Image (cartoon, rainbow, N blue to C red):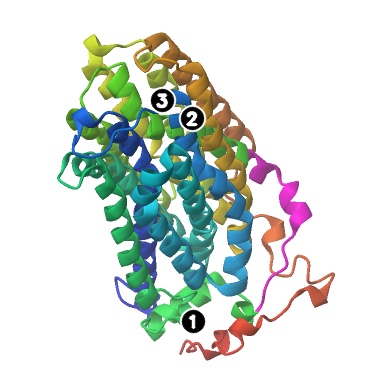
Amino acid sequence: MTAETNKGPVLGMRHVQALLIFLNITTVFIGRLNVGVSVVAMTNAETTNPNFPEYDWTEAEKSYIFSSFFWGYILTQFIGGYLCKRFGVKSVMFWGVFVSGVCSALTPLFIGFGGWQAYCGIRVVMGLAQGLVFPCIHHHLAKWSPPAERNRLGALSHTGMECGNVSAMFLSGMIAKSAIGWPGISYVSAGLAFAWCAIWFVFAADNAVESRYITQEELHYIESSLKHNEDYHKTVIPVPWMAIWTSAPFLALTLTRCCATWGLSTLQAQIPTYMNGVLDMDMKSNAFFSALPFLAMWIMSYVYLIIADVLLAGNRLSLTALRKTFNSLAFWIPCATLIGIGFLDQEQKNLAIALMTISVGVNSGATIGSSLNTIDLSPNHASILMGILNTAVTVVPIVTPLIVGVIVHEDDNRAEWQIVFIIAAVLFFVGNSVYLYFGTAVSQPWDAEDYLTVKVPELAKVPAIHEAGKGIDDLPRSP
């Protein structure tokens, strides 16, 4: 039997799990990012549907709304990393997305009786729910992805970020103009979240061993390629906290992702406002052109993925070199374009849109460049690393809109927006420089399953939740 045959179906359950993560990221990003369009629609009803209430919110109040999601999101990153190791990804992801959907459904009601303060409140709760998700995603990818396919499956699933960005910008604008107005943005977001929960409940599994639909060939391929101990799925591997907190590659990655998030969150949250103010674009064209950069990002993510597959398959670049090359493109090209954007006004709106499209489109290389690096450094502790990293990263979108609110007092003041874009450009440059020097895609010594248990064997415990599950002993043996 050949190694290729042992992989099972050409499209197996590992691909289904990647698709489920893609849909998950798309869904939660729509719920998270539609606020950029929603706030414009709520405060300027003439450009959308005037049959719905309009609110006179100040720029400071808008900035609180933009950042409020992340007030909750930052609090549950550590918890998400722990819970998915303790109770499994399937249940934690389900409840995180379900609660997020409930928050979307209740948003118009809350705004109606509590204004911007209630809007902030419901988005804090949504942030708490969604904070559980990304640590689970990286843990799930580490459990389901054979090392040879980890970059491909991880990158494919993470293109949900680009799809979510496009949908949040474009579809939200179209919905706001429709008969259901800006409340419809929240209702559609809720419906998508509930639909995903139903699909996830049926097809998801914490690992290949527990999947009801996987073939024996694919099961053996995944589990044998991961090279676990026989009792791996029954064991909670102790976390080497000191080694993680003193790891130069991980600390460099954390700083890099913080810088990346500053630049991208500036564009995600502020593009509608910038286009409406400086470029003097109405909501209908604003919705399309706000989505255009993220459509380019979505398309470019697949271009990067194809190039990465070719380079890795031909051994032209090591994984470390590939990640640093793509990250440099994703960070340093936007350095120049962001500065250029700040010097353009409504007379040069086409050029401004082109530069924004280039900035965001090229930035999609950061997914392969650095987003997936937590799984490289430690597949066994990917959820913990992602919990730590995302906690630090989440500070950024809390601060970014508040900084924008302090700098930008008038939406149509180009000089104030120049400062915003220059700050983002400088952080892009610094973040990638640090990653080039300290970053690596090599698994760290502290990832070893016995890194701590050799010294302290009693740290390895068997959680009751996995007692009834089958283990690696149940796998078919190679002939």
Q: CA distance from mark 3 to mark 1?
A: 43 Å
Res. 333 mark? 3
Q: Work out whether residue 325 can be spotted.
A: no
In the image, 436 versus 199, the foreground residue is 199
Asked whether, in this view, residue 343 is left or right of residue 44, the answer is: right
Q: CA distance from mark 2 to mark 1?
A: 44 Å
Q: Amino acid at mark 1?
A: Val
| Secondary structure type for disc 1 | helix
Proximity of marks 2 and 3: CB atoms separated by less than 8 Å: no
Residue 25, quarter of the rendered image: bottom left
In this picture, is 193 found above or below 123?
A: below
Which of discs 2 and 1 lies nearer the camera? The answer is 2
- Residue extent of the magenta highlight: 235-253
Residue 393 image position (x, y, % from top left): 57, 41
Q: CA distance from mark 2 to mark 3?
A: 23 Å
Residue 195 image position (x, y, % from top left): 30, 66
Which residue in the protein does label 1 denote? 209
Give the mark nearest the N terminus, 2 or 1: 1
Res. 268 mark? none
Q: Amino acid at mark 3?
A: Ile
Residue occupying image coordinates x 43% and y 43%: 114
Proximity of marks 2 and 1: CB atoms separated by less than 8 Å: no
| Secondary structure type for disc 3 | helix
| Secondary structure type for disc 2 | helix
Which residue in the protein does label 2 denote? 401
In the image, 240 versus 397, the foreground residue is 397
Residue occupying image coordinates x 70% and y 42%: 248
Magenta span contains residue 30 = no
